Image (cartoon, rainbow, N blue to C red):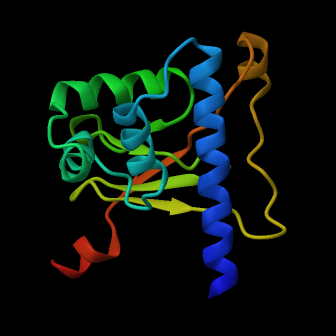
Amino acid sequence: MNLQLNEQKEELQKRLNRFEAQCRAKGLRVTEQRREIFCTVAQSCEHPSAEKVFQSVRKTLPNVSLDTVYRTLASLEDMDLLMRVGLSSKARFDGDLRPHCHFVCTRCGEVYDIFPQTGDAPLPLPRAAREMGEVKQVNLQLRGICKKCQAKK
């Protein structure tokens, strides 16, 4: 258990270091608001929506606005620090940029991580994609109905 907790802390620190380096590279200050918004997503396994990020950040920074959260999330996404996942009507954000896929429930909008198992072959990148330009990120989303929603039938 402690090993897993230490690994999570190390991973979060890697994400924070990358965040700060990217901000400096783009000439952006590492403001308290920007850092808190990033940390909220980076340490969450729930793929929070902008509204959930806003609710969480307001606990420590009560003067933050929803507009600031939306703009900051968009800029963090542009800087390749976060990725947008889920349904277009219910956009969620993921701060874990390690290779993995997402299962998106088309009924409730929940997003689940699917990490490759040891020995799994990585998903092949189509040649046509490489011919179009530099691929920076692959985001595979599987869509269907999750077990929770299936059980509600």
Q: Quadrant of residue 79?
A: top right
Q: Nearer the viewer, residue 76 or 115?
A: 76
Q: Position of residue 91 (x, y in %)?
A: 30, 39
Total marks shown come to 0
Residue that appears at 82% across and 57% down: 121
Q: Nearer the viewer, residue 24 or 107?
A: 24
Q: Quadrant of residue 87?
A: top left
Q: Position of residue 151 (x, y in %)?
A: 23, 81
Quadrant where the C terminus is found in the figure: bottom left
Q: Is residue 75 visible?
A: yes
Residue that appears at 57% across and 52% down: 101
Residue 9 drawn above or below residue 85: below
Q: Position of residue 45 (x, y in %)?
A: 44, 61
Q: Is residue 34 left or right of residue 65?
A: right
Q: Position of residue 120 (x, y in %)?
A: 79, 63
Residue that lies at the very extreme toward the bottom in this rendered image: 1
Q: Is residue 10 left or right of residue 84?
A: right
Quadrant where the N terminus is found in the figure: bottom right
Residue 88 drawn above or below residue 102: above
Residue that appears at 38% across and 53% down: 47
Q: Quadrant of residue 97?
A: top right
Residue that appears at 21% across and 59% down: 108
Q: Is residue 85 visible?
A: no
Q: Is residue 105 left or right of residue 22?
A: left
Residue 46 drawn above or below residue 132: below
